[in-house]
Amino acid sequence: MRPKGTAAELEARRRLAVQRVADGWSRAEVAAFLGVHRETVAEWVRAHKADGDPALAAKPHPGRPPFLTPEQEKQVLGWLAEAPTKHGFRTDLWTAKRVAQLILQKLEVKFHPHYLREWLTKRNYTPQKPARRAKQRNPEAIAGWLQKDWPRIKKKSGARTPTSS
C-alpha cells in the first residue's frame, strides 16, 4: 500500500528520518515518531549512505499513459463544440458512445464509453439532453394562442367560484 502524502512530503519524511538518525536518535525512535516500521528507516539510512541525497528523492510514478495526446484532446473537444450531425450522426445529441465512435473513426484510438464518460466529466462535460419537442411544433401558432386564446380561457376560469364540499 502506498503511503499517504504527496511525493514532496514523502521525500521530506525520508530526509527527516536520515537527519534524526544522524542526530543520534535510534531507528526505533525515528520510526515511532514518523509512524513507519524501523526497518523502513534502516532502508532509508542504508540508501542514503550508499547513494547520498538522490537516493531519498521522490521517484516519478506516472501511471498509465493517457490515451490521447494534448493535441488530440483539443481536437476532440473541438468536435464536441460542433453539432453531432456535422459528423454524420442523425440527431443533435452527443453521447459517450458516439464520441467513442468518432474518436475511433478519426484518431484510431479505442475508448470504452464508460471510461469516456469519466474523461468527459473531468473536462466539465456533463450528460445533458435537449428538451423534447414535437417535430410538428409551430412556434407562430403557439405565440398566437398565448396572445389570443389563453387570456380568454384564463378569464373564464377565474369567473367560476369553487363549490364547497
Image (cartoon, rainbow, N blue to C red):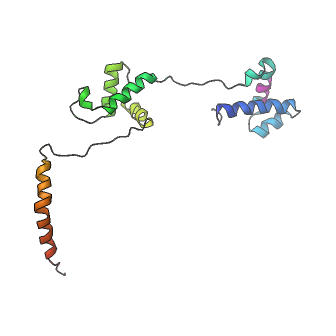
Residue at left offset 16%, top offset 45%: 134
Image height of 72 relative to 21, above or below = above
Q: Residue furthest right?
A: 24
Identify the image quadrant of the C terminus: bottom left
On screen, residue 117 versus residue 157, left or right, reads right
Q: Nearer the viewer, residue 135 or 64?
A: 135
Is residue 145 covered in magenta?
Answer: no
Q: Which quadrant of the structure image shows residue 53?
A: top right
Image height of 142 relative to 163, above or below = above
Residue at left offset 83%, top offset 37%: 29
State whether residue 110 appears in this view.
yes
Residue 33 at what x, y percent from top left?
79, 40
Image height of 132 relative to 42, above or below = below
Q: Nearer the viewer, residue 95 or 124?
A: 124
Q: Which quadrant of the structure image shows residue 163?
A: bottom left
First to last magenta residue range: 41-45
